[in-house]
Image (cartoon, rainbow, N blue to C red):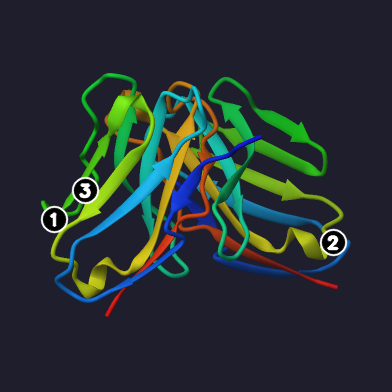
Amino acid sequence: GAGVSQSPSNKVTEKGKDVELRCDPISGHTALYWYRQSLGQGLEFLIYFQGNSAPDKSGLPSDRFSAERTGGSVSTLTIQRTQQEDSAVYLCASSPSDSRQPQHFGDGTRLSIL
Amino acid sequence: SQQGEEDPQALSIQEGENATMNCSYKTSINNLQWYRQNSGRGLVHLILIRSNEREKHSGRLRVTLDTSKKSSSLLITASRAADTASYFCATDARDYGQNFVFGPGTRLSVLP
Protein backbone atom coordinates (compact mmCIF):
# COMPACT_ATOMS: atom_id res chain seq x y z
CA GLY A 1 0.00 0.00 0.00
CA ALA A 2 1.02 3.64 -0.40
CA GLY A 3 3.12 5.02 2.39
CA VAL A 4 4.08 8.58 3.22
CA SER A 5 5.55 10.26 0.18
CA GLN A 6 7.90 13.23 0.28
CA SER A 7 9.20 15.35 -2.56
CA PRO A 8 11.69 16.24 -3.70
CA SER A 9 13.99 13.55 -2.30
CA ASN A 10 16.94 15.90 -2.67
CA LYS A 11 17.10 19.67 -2.95
CA VAL A 12 20.17 21.81 -3.46
CA THR A 13 19.71 25.56 -3.40
CA GLU A 14 21.63 28.73 -2.83
CA LYS A 15 21.63 30.60 0.43
CA GLY A 16 18.85 33.17 0.54
CA LYS A 17 16.46 31.27 -1.72
CA ASP A 18 13.06 30.00 -0.59
CA VAL A 19 12.29 26.28 -0.68
CA GLU A 20 9.09 24.26 -0.47
CA LEU A 21 9.03 20.67 0.72
CA ARG A 22 5.99 18.50 0.14
CA CYS A 23 4.50 15.65 2.14
CA ASP A 24 1.70 13.32 1.06
CA PRO A 25 0.53 11.42 4.16
CA ILE A 26 -1.16 8.06 4.20
CA SER A 27 -4.78 8.45 3.13
CA GLY A 28 -7.08 8.83 6.11
CA HIS A 29 -4.35 9.76 8.59
CA THR A 30 -5.41 12.85 10.48
CA ALA A 31 -2.13 13.55 12.26
CA LEU A 32 0.87 14.88 10.36
CA TYR A 33 4.30 15.79 11.72
CA TRP A 34 7.39 17.50 10.36
CA TYR A 35 10.82 16.82 11.83
CA ARG A 36 14.34 17.94 11.03
CA GLN A 37 17.30 15.59 11.31
CA SER A 38 20.86 16.84 11.09
CA LEU A 39 23.61 14.42 10.03
CA GLY A 40 23.99 11.61 12.55
CA GLN A 41 21.56 13.23 14.96
CA GLY A 42 18.12 12.55 16.33
CA LEU A 43 14.89 14.12 15.20
CA GLU A 44 13.97 17.69 16.02
CA PHE A 45 10.21 18.29 16.17
CA LEU A 46 9.03 21.17 13.98
CA ILE A 47 5.25 21.20 13.64
CA TYR A 48 2.21 18.97 14.22
CA PHE A 49 -1.16 19.02 12.47
CA GLN A 50 -4.15 17.17 13.90
CA GLY A 51 -7.36 17.21 11.91
CA ASN A 52 -8.93 20.65 11.79
CA SER A 53 -7.27 21.86 14.98
CA ALA A 54 -4.80 24.71 14.99
CA PRO A 55 -1.32 23.29 14.32
CA ASP A 56 1.26 23.04 17.06
CA LYS A 57 4.06 25.22 15.74
CA SER A 58 6.13 25.20 18.90
CA GLY A 59 9.10 23.49 17.24
CA LEU A 60 9.60 25.87 14.34
CA PRO A 61 13.10 27.36 14.84
CA SER A 62 12.40 30.79 13.37
CA ASP A 63 9.79 32.80 11.51
CA ARG A 64 11.49 31.81 8.26
CA PHE A 65 9.82 28.42 8.69
CA SER A 66 6.14 27.87 8.01
CA ALA A 67 3.90 24.97 7.10
CA GLU A 68 0.40 24.42 5.92
CA ARG A 69 -1.83 21.47 5.38
CA THR A 70 -4.49 21.83 2.73
CA GLY A 71 -7.73 19.90 2.93
CA GLY A 72 -6.43 17.85 5.81
CA SER A 73 -4.11 15.94 3.50
CA VAL A 74 -1.02 17.23 1.69
CA SER A 75 1.35 19.43 3.67
CA THR A 76 3.98 21.88 2.53
CA LEU A 77 6.90 23.06 4.65
CA THR A 78 8.32 26.36 3.45
CA ILE A 79 11.68 27.79 4.42
CA GLN A 80 12.25 31.38 3.41
CA ARG A 81 15.63 33.05 2.91
CA THR A 82 17.46 29.77 3.52
CA GLN A 83 20.63 29.71 5.58
CA GLN A 84 23.43 27.13 5.57
CA GLU A 85 22.35 25.89 9.00
CA ASP A 86 19.03 24.86 7.43
CA SER A 87 20.86 22.02 5.66
CA ALA A 88 19.40 18.77 7.00
CA VAL A 89 17.00 15.98 6.20
CA TYR A 90 13.38 17.01 6.66
CA LEU A 91 11.15 14.10 7.60
CA CYS A 92 7.38 13.94 7.46
CA ALA A 93 5.27 11.41 9.35
CA SER A 94 1.58 10.66 9.67
CA SER A 95 -0.52 8.61 12.04
CA PRO A 96 -4.17 7.55 12.09
CA SER A 97 -5.20 9.90 14.86
CA ASP A 98 -2.90 11.27 17.49
CA SER A 99 0.51 10.93 19.04
CA ARG A 100 -0.49 7.86 21.00
CA GLN A 101 -0.22 5.82 17.84
CA PRO A 102 2.80 4.77 15.77
CA GLN A 103 3.99 7.24 13.19
CA HIS A 104 4.63 6.30 9.58
CA PHE A 105 7.57 8.13 8.06
CA GLY A 106 8.50 9.17 4.57
CA ASP A 107 12.10 8.87 3.43
CA GLY A 108 12.64 12.59 3.81
CA THR A 109 13.95 15.46 1.74
CA ARG A 110 17.69 16.03 1.96
CA LEU A 111 18.15 19.79 1.81
CA SER A 112 21.56 21.27 1.05
CA ILE A 113 22.13 25.01 1.20
CA LEU A 114 25.19 26.19 -0.67
CA SER B 1 20.25 14.94 29.46
CA GLN B 2 17.35 15.32 27.09
CA GLN B 3 13.97 13.63 27.14
CA GLY B 4 14.26 10.28 25.39
CA GLU B 5 18.00 9.78 25.43
CA GLU B 6 19.46 6.50 24.20
CA ASP B 7 22.49 4.74 25.53
CA PRO B 8 24.95 3.70 24.21
CA GLN B 9 25.40 6.11 21.34
CA ALA B 10 27.02 3.37 19.27
CA LEU B 11 27.18 -0.39 19.62
CA SER B 12 29.10 -2.93 17.57
CA ILE B 13 28.46 -6.67 17.96
CA GLN B 14 28.96 -9.93 16.09
CA GLU B 15 26.14 -11.63 14.24
CA GLY B 16 24.26 -13.97 16.54
CA GLU B 17 24.91 -11.93 19.67
CA ASN B 18 22.22 -10.01 21.53
CA ALA B 19 22.07 -6.22 21.44
CA THR B 20 20.67 -4.13 24.26
CA MET B 21 19.91 -0.44 23.98
CA ASN B 22 18.60 1.77 26.74
CA CYS B 23 16.46 4.88 26.79
CA SER B 24 15.97 7.33 29.64
CA TYR B 25 13.41 10.10 29.84
CA LYS B 26 12.47 12.84 32.26
CA THR B 27 8.74 13.55 32.32
CA SER B 28 5.74 11.28 32.78
CA ILE B 29 4.65 9.65 29.55
CA ASN B 30 1.61 8.07 27.93
CA ASN B 31 3.65 5.62 25.92
CA LEU B 32 7.13 4.96 24.63
CA GLN B 33 7.95 3.80 21.15
CA TRP B 34 11.04 2.36 19.50
CA TYR B 35 11.89 3.08 15.90
CA ARG B 36 14.56 1.89 13.52
CA GLN B 37 16.21 3.93 10.76
CA ASN B 38 18.32 2.52 7.99
CA SER B 39 20.81 4.87 6.40
CA GLY B 40 19.14 7.39 4.10
CA ARG B 41 15.63 6.23 4.92
CA GLY B 42 12.78 7.29 7.16
CA LEU B 43 12.04 5.75 10.53
CA VAL B 44 10.15 2.50 10.86
CA HIS B 45 8.04 1.78 13.92
CA LEU B 46 9.07 -1.31 15.90
CA ILE B 47 7.17 -1.47 19.18
CA LEU B 48 4.89 0.74 21.28
CA ILE B 49 4.70 0.12 25.03
CA ARG B 50 2.13 1.91 27.15
CA SER B 51 2.87 3.42 30.51
CA ASN B 52 0.92 0.68 32.32
CA GLU B 53 2.86 -2.12 30.59
CA ARG B 54 6.19 -3.50 31.73
CA GLU B 55 7.28 -5.73 28.86
CA LYS B 56 6.39 -6.42 25.23
CA HIS B 57 7.70 -8.83 22.65
CA SER B 58 7.69 -8.78 18.88
CA GLY B 59 9.65 -11.51 17.13
CA ARG B 60 13.29 -11.11 18.14
CA LEU B 61 12.56 -7.80 19.89
CA ARG B 62 11.87 -7.39 23.59
CA VAL B 63 11.08 -4.04 25.15
CA THR B 64 10.86 -3.29 28.84
CA LEU B 65 9.59 -0.18 30.56
CA ASP B 66 10.33 0.91 34.12
CA THR B 67 8.32 4.02 34.84
CA SER B 68 9.76 4.35 38.35
CA LYS B 69 13.23 4.73 36.82
CA LYS B 70 11.93 6.51 33.72
CA SER B 71 13.79 4.10 31.49
CA SER B 72 13.21 1.55 28.76
CA SER B 73 15.35 -1.04 27.07
CA LEU B 74 15.26 -2.65 23.65
CA LEU B 75 16.76 -6.11 23.31
CA ILE B 76 17.42 -7.63 19.90
CA THR B 77 18.18 -11.33 20.19
CA ALA B 78 20.23 -13.40 17.75
CA SER B 79 21.23 -10.30 15.80
CA ARG B 80 21.72 -10.33 12.05
CA ALA B 81 23.76 -8.11 9.76
CA ALA B 82 20.44 -6.74 8.48
CA ASP B 83 19.74 -5.35 11.97
CA THR B 84 22.47 -2.77 11.36
CA ALA B 85 20.68 0.58 11.71
CA SER B 86 20.06 3.44 14.12
CA TYR B 87 17.49 2.86 16.82
CA PHE B 88 15.50 5.65 18.43
CA CYS B 89 13.16 5.79 21.37
CA ALA B 90 10.33 8.29 21.30
CA THR B 91 8.17 9.40 24.17
CA ASP B 92 4.66 10.72 24.02
CA ALA B 93 4.28 13.26 26.77
CA ARG B 94 1.67 15.51 25.20
CA ASP B 95 -0.35 15.58 28.39
CA TYR B 96 2.69 17.01 30.14
CA GLY B 97 3.42 19.91 27.88
CA GLN B 98 5.71 18.15 25.48
CA ASN B 99 5.36 16.89 21.99
CA PHE B 100 6.49 13.57 20.68
CA VAL B 101 10.20 13.58 21.56
CA PHE B 102 12.86 11.46 19.92
CA GLY B 103 16.24 10.72 21.44
CA PRO B 104 19.54 11.02 19.52
CA GLY B 105 19.58 7.28 18.80
CA THR B 106 21.89 4.30 19.12
CA ARG B 107 23.87 3.31 16.03
CA LEU B 108 24.01 -0.48 15.95
CA SER B 109 26.51 -2.29 13.76
CA VAL B 110 26.17 -6.06 13.44
CA LEU B 111 29.28 -7.58 11.95
CA PRO B 112 28.95 -10.76 9.85
Residue that badge 3 annotates: A60
Numbered disc 3: secondary structure: loop
Mark 2 on the same chain as mark 1: no
Indicate the amino acid at tag 3: Leu
B96 and B45: which one is in front?
B45
Residue that badge 2 annotates: B17
Q: Can residue B28 be seen in the rendering of this structure?
A: no
A47 and B67: which one is in front?
A47
Which mark, residue B47? Answer: none
* Residue plotted at (46% across, 34% down): A94
How far apart, in angstroms, are the residues tagged by discs 3 and 2? 41 Å
* Residue plotted at (49% across, 22% down): A28
- Chain letter of the residue beneath label 3 in the structure image: A
Residue that badge 1 annotates: A64
Indicate the quadrant where residue B84 lies: bottom right
In the current view of this chain or complex, which residue is farthest to the bottom? A114
Indicate the amino acid at tag 1: Arg
Q: Which is closer to the viewer, label 2 or label 1?
A: 1
Please rate how many residues cluster around mark 3, counting C-alpha atoms within 10 Å: few if below 14, some from 14 to 19, many from 20: some
Q: Dividing the image into 4 quarters, which one contains the N terminus of chain A?
A: top right
Q: Dividing the image into 4 quarters, which one contains the C terminus of chain A?
A: bottom left
Q: Where is residue B87 in the image (x, y as percent from the top left)?
A: 60, 54
Q: In this view, does A14 lie to the left or right of A91?
A: left
Q: Is residue B34 above or below residue B104?
A: above
